[in-house]
Every structure is written in structure tokens, then in C-alpha cells.
Amino acid sequence: MGCSSSVPARNTGGLNTISNDSSPDASSKDLRAKLVLLGDSGVGKSCIVLRFVRGQFDPTSKVTVGASFLSQTLALEDSTIVKFEIWDTAGQERYAALAPLYYRGAAAAIVVYDITSPESFSKAQYWVKELQKHGSPGIVMVLVGNKADLHDNRSVSSQDAQDYAEKNNMFFIETSAKTADNINQLFEEIAKRLPRPTAS
Amino acid sequence: MDPPNPNPNDAPSLPAESAARLAALSLCGTRDLPPDFHTAEILDDDEGYLTSASRGGSSTSAWKEAPEGLHDDDKDGDDVSQPSPRSSGYAGERGSSLDDDADPDPDPDQDWARGKKHPHEDDASSSWRKRKKHFFILSNSGKPIYSRYGDEHKLAGFSATLQAIISFVENSGDHIKFVRAGKHQIVFLVKGPIYLVCISCTEESYEGLRGQLELMYGQLLLILTKSVNKCFEKNPRFDMATLLGGTDAVFLSLIHAFSWNPATFLHAYTCLPLAQSTRQAASAVLQDIADSGVLFALLMCEHKVISLVGAQKATLHPDDILLLANFILSSGSFRTSESFVPICLPRYNPMAYLHAYVHFFDEHTYVTLLTTRSDAFYDLKDSRAHIQNALLKSNVLIEVQRSLHENALRVEDLPTNPSSQSASHPPESSQDISSQSLSSEMAIGGPGGLWHFIYKSIYLDQFVSSEFPSPISNKKQKKGLYKAYQKLYASMHDKATGPHKTQFRRDEDYVLFCWITQDFELYAAFNPLADKTQAIKMCNRVCQWVRDLENEIFVYGESTLSW
Ligand SMILES: Nc1nc2c(ncn2[C@@H]2O[C@H](COP(=O)(O)OP(=O)(O)OP(=O)(O)O)[C@@H](O)[C@H]2O)c(=O)[nH]1
Ligand SMILES: [Mg+2]
């Protein structure tokens, strides 16, 4: 990633968490939002982010270690500009204990599973519960069924996922990082759901 | 950070399932070394070719020329090793990458095992038994943790066998160090609840293999810290393998380093040669950062150090540098974007995690900032921007790229009379004395038949090695030479008979010379017909040459780095 000129505001506030100020910039309609991706290893979190940020799909994508940081801005139709600061976390089990570092203070969380893997769907439910318990209040949560291009091997039905999402007050979408299907829609939906600055 | 959580709450029931599978397998697993363990045909991934060894020597039955370049060398070790019948997914893919991530497997289930080599092998497959060098990590309850080849879970029975051997000896209040079985040597290393085992028929020394196991353990600690032991206290049947998920590439790359990176046996690090002023510019900006609360700041190009700085009294052990660089370089995701990851430096503090900020400036050059603060990411990101600006301003990154291609030490450039030459511009060459009556192939290389050398400064804990000249151009030859150096190192440092000051060895492949003083260790290889007095003369010239170049090939004056 390039040499970003923006210097994110810091908000350590004694909390042992990586967080920056996700509150809107008062002077404009610009939003800055901390976004975190959670989900089992191999479901395609990094591929989703790289598709969104760089427009690429790398089938040889590497297992993430710790967490990767990327940012991307998105212009909405109502001319709001949203700057996403994205934490792509590692799905490997040894890093699970670190997750709070990344989801605390996040404005939005994308919980990803792989539509061909029921195990990854139950892992997604684990993350949803964890976010409900410990995430920021009002956090925008999205359930994403990735690898939609592999529908021939589907083993998690859209209906089941949809039902689960509704029960938990989440937005649900199926994506394919490979074909780019629904990737931009995913982030646009999140942007739309972010709390707007109260009129000043 | 807390010790890793082995079983995050109500995670999917996978562990239980696999435990059951394991139990079932261990019942029918082989409990002894298979009778045909000592087969004539040996699969050696380190060498990338298939030998059929017979008593009188070995003949190469299939040779695959490796791509040129020291780095790639060992990474394609698996190219021509026999794929097991079911591992068809891999067959066509090998060659460019160490990670099997690079393997776009059509079967989605494979995604869950990304990074595994020959996952379908187990101790019942003949290809598995023919492997020349195995590495295993297991728990003291016999649970497999890591295997170089094959799926750990399928090796439960074999693991139980190893555990039985080790525990049998440990229970009698003794320690098992190694076992010899025909051509095979089995080396054991016991680290609390964790056992490490190497089974090898590579004729490496016991000390050498043990050192490699120590580094394997260090790599494991770098990923999990020593506090993982607590998991075994709570649950002796704890399944540690899941905690190492996705790290196969890291261990594989370390195992490959055993056969090409002298740092693995010299316990020293190496620097990228750079003009003194360039390195000073890099060090200055890192020093700035270290003064602002970073514990260690390292700027590296591949496995070579450009500059490193530690806060106050903090010192970095060469083994930690090796393991850290190996971890970063073998985990592909660091190159994609800036990362923040907990790692442990086993020589610095095996119990605690540090947090590492890693950023690649280009394909080869990266900065690593280490801190104890888990909330330091944005500070470190700012620091990196500051470093990047400074490096761009002083052209350091361009110089680094140049050095990567140009600054290598070549024996052909060994000056006739080093101290009289300008240090930065070694003379063209000194063909005058180079190998008088040798065949044309032999004549290539440096003066006096010098082919290659490694010089380690004891005071600095740094080494420098020359490029390989054409007589040692292929992978097999390079590896052969490194193995010879390792043996030499082991015999020079043998506690029973040593330490020695000099050693001169001649065999059919080369003449090896080693010279150890209070200040340095020199390892040099000459063509097999080289003359002893000439060789000694050349060694003196090499030492002088290295001293003349020391400001460019070593990192100096890190007042914080004295130990
Ligand atoms: N067919 C298909 N494959 C995908 C898709 N997205 C990702 N993959 C593949 O799935 C594998 C894992 O993708 P990653 O993005 O690295 O997975 P991750 O969730 O980031 O995994 P961790 O970093 O280990 O947590 C890669 O081999 C991708 O090529 C997709 O939409 N369709
Ligand atoms: Mg990832």
C-alpha cells in the first residue's frame, strides 16, 4: 500500500485496543469508518478486501498472519465519501484471542464464511455471538457467504444464512471475490448503514 | 498478549472429531519403524533430484536443473520428488513457490489445508519412507504437532512410536540424544512437553542436526511463545497442531535454509553490502524511531540486514534475526499489505509476545518495528512513513536494489595486495596466479584455486560469504559445499577434540580450509588440486580484503548492539 498521507486520529483511551476515531469529520460529509473482517481461515477474507481495494483476485492468496491493514474510499450517490480503514484479520485459531484488538471500536464488521463449508458457517456464528457480546454497541454487522461462484459445491443454503442473519439483525449477502460478484455492493451497503453525523 | 487460546469457546466441533479420528488411526498405526525403512532409493527434497544410492556411491537418475540464484535454490526442492499417487493436485504446480498456497486446487476442500507438502503421505507410503530427511515435532503424550512430510494426523501411530522411545529413556532418568539405524541417524531434542525429532540419512553431524532442531523449536516459539507449555499442563492431550495452522511454509523454508543459509550453523547474521554513508543514513532514521519507544527496528533485504537498532540495552540475537526474517519472508501475506502481528523472539524473551509491524517497501526490502505495546499500530504506521521518506530522500532503497545485483563479493575480485587497493573498488581480477596447470573448468574461480569463502567476525556476530563461482554453480554442488562447511564447523567446535585453530581437508570435490582465531572464523573452499601453501596465502588475502571492506560489508557502531 502506498504512502498514505492521512494520519488517523488516535484514541487509545487506556483501552488495550487498536482503534482510531471513527466519528465523522465535522467539516464535511466525509465519513471515516473502521471496518473489521472476521471468519475462519480460508473463507476468502483477504480476497474480498483485495478485490475491493485493488480490484484484483489472486488465487494464490496467502494465509494472513496477525492482521493486515488496508484502506479504501468509496463515494456514495448522495456524494458522501466514506473512507474505510480495513482490518483483515487472520482466521487461524492461534490469533483468535487477538480479535478484540481489531473489532473494538469498529464501526462495522464483516463476518465471512465459505458457502461450500458448513464448518466455516458455524465459525461465523461464533464470531457473531462474540461481536454481540463484546463489539461496539451499534456496530454494523454483515454476514457474507463467499465463493458464490462455487455454487455446485454449495453446502450452506442461502435461506439458512438469510434466516440466521435476520434473527441477528444483520445484513446478508453472497459474494464472489473471484468473479467480483456483489463485492462493491457489500461495501456500499455497509457505507449506507453507517450512522451519519447528526446535523450540525 | 495472553497465551493463545487453544479452544475458543464453542468453536466448531472439529477438534473433537479429529481427536476421534486420531485415536482410531493410532490403533492401527505402525508401531515400529517399517521393515523397509532403509530402502535404497532416497527421495531428497533438499537436493531436488532423485538418487539411487548404491554402496559405491550414488548415481543421479533424474536431475532437474534449478533456476539460478541462491534464493530460489532450495525453494523448489520438491520439483522432481515423486508425488504420492493421490497427490495429483500438486504434480504440475511445483517449481515456483514454496507455499502450496500457490496451488490453485480445483477441489475446494483443499483450501483448508493450504500450505501442506505431500499431505496424502503417511508412514505407510513408500514415498514417505524414502524421504532423506524428516523433521517431526510431537507432544510428550505422543500427539503429532508437525511433520515435514505427510499429514500430521495420519502420522499419529508413528508419532506414538517416537514418543514411546523418548519416554522410555526419559522415565529411567536419562536423556536420549540420538540413535543410529543403518544409514539413518535419529536425533532427539526434548523441550519440556515438546519433543523434536530428525530422521536423516544425509550424513550430517549429530551437533549439526541438533542445532537444526533447536532452530525448529525457536521457530515454534516465535509463533506461539513458551507459554504454550501451559496448555499441556491443563490438558496433556492438548492438540497443538491446530495452533500452528498455516505455518507449514514457515517450517519448510527454515528446513530449506539449513542447506543454503550459513546463518543456521554459524549463529551469525549477514549484511547487505552498502556504502558506509548509505548505511549510516538508514541507521540514523531507525535510531530516531528507536528513541521514540520502539524496542527494535530492522531494515532488511531478504535475509540480509541493512541496518538494525535496538532501544537502550536491548540486544537482538542472530538466531532471532534468522527466525524472524524466515517467518516474514515465508508468510506471503506480508508482501500484500502492511501487517501487525504478535511474534516472540525466543532468545530475547521466550515467554512473551512482542508486536511486530511489518511493511515491504518493495519485493525484497522490508522494515520490521517491534514493540511491547499491542495498541501501537498507528504510531508504528506513522514511524514507517517517516522512515520511508528518509530512505527515499537519501536514495537508500535505490542503493539497496543496486547492491542486491552488484555488490556481491566475488573470489575473482580478490585483490592481489588488498591493503594497497581502494577498499570500495577491488581490482578487476588477479588472473596472474590463478591455478596454473589446471583444466579450464578448474581454472575458473579466484586466484590460487579459491572457489568460495565464509568469514565470520566473532566480535560482531556477523558473517560475509562470497558468491558462488562457476565451478560450484548448480544447486547440488552448492549444497554439497554447505554440508562440507557444516561438518567442518562441527569438527572445529567439537568439545571433545577441539577447539581447533586450523584445519586443512582434501577430498575429491574440494580442498577445505578453516582457520579460527579470537577475532574471526574463516571457511574457504578451493579446487581439489589446490596447493596448501598457496591456499594459506589466499586465506590471508581474504582476511585482509574483508578487513579493507569491513565498513561496507558489516553493520558497525551500533552502540546498542553489544553483547
Ligand atoms: N472460487 C473462489 N475461491 C475463492 C474466493 N475467495 C477466495 N478464494 C480462495 O480461497 C482461498 C483463501 O482465500 P483468502 O482470502 O486467503 O482466505 P482468508 O479468509 O483471508 O484466510 P486467512 O487469511 O487464513 O484467515 C484462496 O485460495 C482463494 O483463492 C471466491 O470468491 N471464489
Ligand atoms: Mg487472509
Image (spheres, coloured by chain):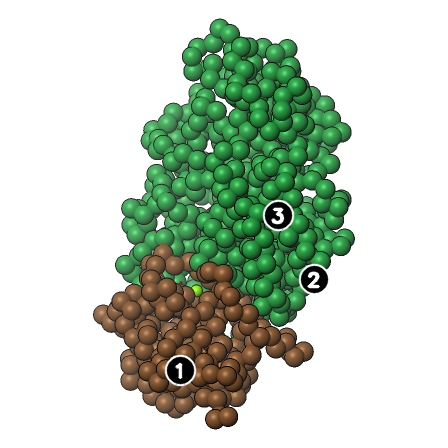
Q: Which mark is residue B519?
A: none
| Residue shown at 52% from the left, 85% from the top | A26
**Quick one: which residue is furthest to the top in this view?**
B437
Label 2 within 8 A of ligand 2 by Cβ:
no
Q: Say whether marks 2 and 3 touch (CB < 8 Å).
A: no
Kindly report which numbered mark, 2 or 3, lies closer to the viewer in this rendering: 3
| Residue B248 in picture, x, y percent from top left | 47, 53
Residue at mark 2 to residue at mark 3: CA–CA distance: 18 Å
In the picture, the disc for residue A80 is: 1
**Callout 2 amino acid:** Gly
Q: Chain of mark 1?
A: A
The colour one sees for chain A in the rendered image is brown
Which residue does the image show at 27% across and 72% down from the upper left? A181
Mark yes or no: residue B406 visible.
Answer: yes
Q: Which residue is mark 2?
A: B293
**Where is residue A123, by image quadrant?**
bottom left
Q: Position of residue B164 (x, y in %)?
A: 58, 51
Q: Which chain is green?
A: B
Q: Are marks 1 and 2 on the same chain?
A: no
Which quadrant is home to the C terminus of chain B?
Answer: top right
Crowd class of label 2 (few under 14; some 14 to 19; many from 20; radius 10 Å): some
Expressed as whole percent of the image width and height from the top left, the position of residue A174 reads 31, 77
Mark closer to the observer (1, 2)? 1
Measured in 3D between alpha carbons, the distance from the residue under mark 1 to the one under mark 3, in whole angstroms, is 41 Å
Q: Quadrant of ligand 2?
A: bottom left
Residue B217 seen anywhere in this rendered image of the structure: no
